[in-house]
């Protein structure tokens, strides 16, 4: 499994897919307090996978061929990964709401409804450059020399607004959707800094702004 790992965020938790739509089931099962093995050993799961085998001709008729639909990976991005044809059935075992969300994310990945990742990544880089310029100018106007921590704090603020965690994130591991949200937050933060808004007020403004964007995206889904 060498395809690109694409993380999405569900209720402030990262859910990892790959570019072929496979779901890292181990990570999300733990967050629901469950184990993938408990689901995969259910008679209904065994029966459904056998039906998939027959329907898709991925194995001999009536044979339970686990590797075609459930794979275990060790090391980086390790865990039990589930085929997109099976992922929603697994997600429904965890939560109907999560299953509906999961179905939409897989559809985006396989049908390419989102903006190309490379384009979203370039826009996020430009947005961050503009934000850094705003931080630098703001420091200079206050008679301070911009320091490294000023830029790090601002980047971590954006991460907290987007993902609920005040920490660094590898932007190359973000999905196109997350990069788009990141860019919008950076652009707004740049404007708020230019208006001289204090940090705490900017944080609340950005949180409210992102909640509004999320509401709109759910209506459009």
Image (cartoon, rainbow, N blue to C red):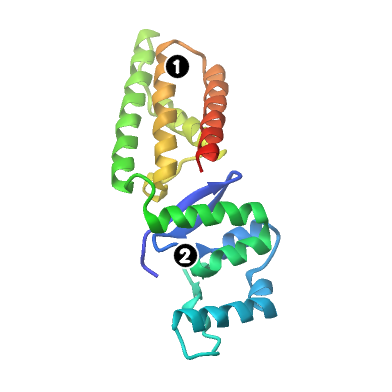
> Can you say which quadrant of the picture contains the N terminus?
bottom left
Does any portion of residue 166 appear in the rendered image?
Answer: no
Q: Are marks 2 and 1 in contact (CB under 8 Å)?
A: no
State the residue at coordinates (55%, 40%): 218
Which quadrant holds residue 31?
bottom right
Q: Mark 1 highlights which residue?
A: 192
Element type at mark 1 = helix
Q: In the shown orientation, is residue 160 left or right of residue 176?
A: right
Tell me where residue 128 appears, x and y as whole percent: 35, 31
Q: Nearer the viewer, mark 2 or mark 1?
A: 2
Tell me where residue 144 appears, x and y as whole percent: 38, 13
- 120 vs 13, nearest the viewer: 120
Tell me where residue 91 appears, x and y as whole percent: 61, 61
State the residue at coordinates (39%, 25%): 187
Crowding at mark 2 (Cα within 10 Å: few <14, some 14-19, many 20+): many
State the residue at coordinates (55%, 65%): 87
- The alpha-carbon separation of the residues under discs 2 and 1 comes to 39 Å
Crowding at mark 1 (Cα within 10 Å: few <14, some 14-19, many 20+): some
Give above or below for 197 relative to 128: above
Q: Total number of numbered labels?
A: 2
Give above or below for 196 relative to 177: above
Which quadrant holds residue 134?
top left
Give above or below for 176 relative to 89: above
Q: What mark, if any, has residue 22 been given in the picture?
A: 2
């Amino acid at each position: 499994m060498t395809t690109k790992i694409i993380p999405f965020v569900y209720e402030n938790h990262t859910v990892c897919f790959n570019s072929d739509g496979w779901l890292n089931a181990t990570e999300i099962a733990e967050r629901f307090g469950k184990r993938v093995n408990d689901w995969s050993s259910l008679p209904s799961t065994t029966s459904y996978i056998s039906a998939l085998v027959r329907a898709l001709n991925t194995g001999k008729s009536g044979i339970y061929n686990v590797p075609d639909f459930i794979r275990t990976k060790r090391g980086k991005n390790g865990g039990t990964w589930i085929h997109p044809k099976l992922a929603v059935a697994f997600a429904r075992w965890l939560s109907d709401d999560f299953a509906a969300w999961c179905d939409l994310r897989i559809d985006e990945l396989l049908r390419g409804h989102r903006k190309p990742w490379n384009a979203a990544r370039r826009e996020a880089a430009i947005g961050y450059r503009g934000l850094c310029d705003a931080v630098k100018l703001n420091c200079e106007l206050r008679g301070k020399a911009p320091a490294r921590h000023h830029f790090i704090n601002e980047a971590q603020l954006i991460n907290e607004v987007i993902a609920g965690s005040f920490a660094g994130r590898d932007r190359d591991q973000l999905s196109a959707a997350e990069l788009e949200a990141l860019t919008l937050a950076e652009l707004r933060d740049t404007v708020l800094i230019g208006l001289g808004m204090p940090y705490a007020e900017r944080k609340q403004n950005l949180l409210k702004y992102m909640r509004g964007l999320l509401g709109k995206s759910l209506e459009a889904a």
